[in-house]
Image: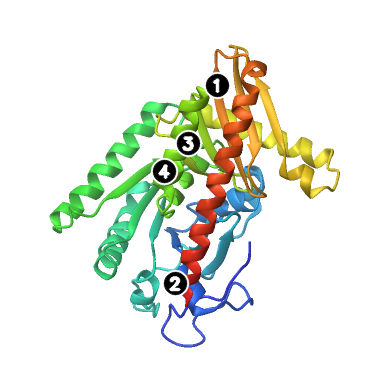
Amino acid sequence: MAEINPPELFIGSDAIQPFSQEPVSMAEQEAKPQIILMGLRRCGKSSIAQVVFNKITPNGTVLLESTTKIEFTDIETNTFLHYELVEIPGQMDIFESTVPMNHEGLFSNCDAVIYIIDCSDSYESALPYLYQIVTCAHKINPKIRFEVFIHKTDVLRQDGDKLAIRRSIYYKVTRDLQDSCLEAVKLHFYLTSIYDYSIFEALSSVVQKLIPELPTLENMLNLLNQKCRIEKSYLFDLHSKIYIATDSTPLDIAMYALVSDMIDTVLDLANIYDSGSDAKDANLSSTFELNNKSFLFLKKVNQYLALVVFMTGEDLQETSGLIEYNFYLFKKALENVFEIRTRKSKEKLL
């Protein structure tokens, strides 16, 4: 991940401190999707970013200091997953008269706002700020997607309690928007925690919406499933464990957790027995046999991405040739999608 100089969000030259010193052209900045993390102080914004993208353990985030300035991070871990992550400090109310914020500069090029609500605290105090953000951002840029993470759900033991809070927040937010004639604004709500896989699943859903090639990738996975009698397939970013695409079958969070554990195990073993050969690493594959005569099969498709599939009721040895051949075709098709995306990106920068 590279860090970049921020655009001018504040009025005044000394109001913002850049998160990095690496210069990037304005054309490149405009070409990247942008996600803004917002929420009240200590709601968990920095912890989410550190756990997902910097591999800090959830317990390690206890020592993180509060963010005091706007931070810009360039996320680029594979050809599809390339966007700018902007974190707004919780103690900085962008609507306060003492904060000379340029709202137009903040939201005009934004693709998604992730608003974090700490459900372990009095979550109702976070709703007025969410309402202000939605009304302001939607007026400036109606195309912005609003994603609400109801966070720190690990403090709630019962699933019923989590669903009750989600339902309460949903009704209060939608009611306020309807009262302001903003019922057309759509918000998506997620229950998240850094202590389980819910945060990775939620971020996967958000990031996928920024990938124009998503329908193509989904169709490719559906076709692979049909040809190889696969139950479920994912295209994973190995660094962040965000899946950038999956097939059209319903998502099972337990299966996602199992696949994530598999990725951790495979990468840990690969690091232990690393031969230093890029060619060998590029062909990394692994098979896990489960107790119920089912299999998880992982195969790397490039330096950053891996295809992970779940199969049942098959003798993997009997079908391995068919699977390998169809994986080869999938990899070639994916390379074609890469090439088309790269060519279009270059055309936009001209």
Q: For the residues marked 2 and 4, what is the alpha-carbon distance in whole angstroms?
A: 42 Å
Relative to residue 299, is residue 336 depicted above or below? below
Type of amino acid under label 4 = Cys
Callouts 2 and 1 close, C-beta under 8 Å: no
Give the residue at mark 2.
Answer: 348
Q: Position of residue 264 (x, y in %)?
A: 68, 36
Camera-side residue of 201 and 19 = 201
Q: For the residues marked 1 and 3, what is the alpha-carbon distance in whole angstroms?
A: 14 Å
Between disc 2 and disc 1, whose residue precedes? 1
Q: Residue at x 60, y 52 (%)?
A: 53
Between disc 2 and disc 4, whose residue precedes? 4
Relative to residue 192, is residue 140 depicted above or below? below
Q: Position of residue 21 (x, y in %)?
A: 64, 77
Q: For the residues marked 3 and 4, what is the alpha-carbon distance in whole angstroms?
A: 36 Å
Between disc 2 and disc 3, whose residue precedes? 3
Q: For the residues marked 2 and 1, what is the alpha-carbon distance in whole angstroms?
A: 41 Å
Relative to residue 259, is residue 135 depicted above or below? below
Q: For the residues marked 2 and 3, what is the alpha-carbon distance in whole angstroms?
A: 28 Å
Callouts 1 and 4 close, C-beta under 8 Å: no
Between disc 1 and disc 4, whose residue precedes? 4
Camera-side residue of 77 and 189 = 77
Give the residue at mark 4.
Answer: 119
Residue 219 occupies quadrant: top left
State whether residue 120 appears in this view.
no
Question: How crowded is the residue under tag 4: few (<14 C-alpha within 10 Å), some, or many (20+)?
Answer: many
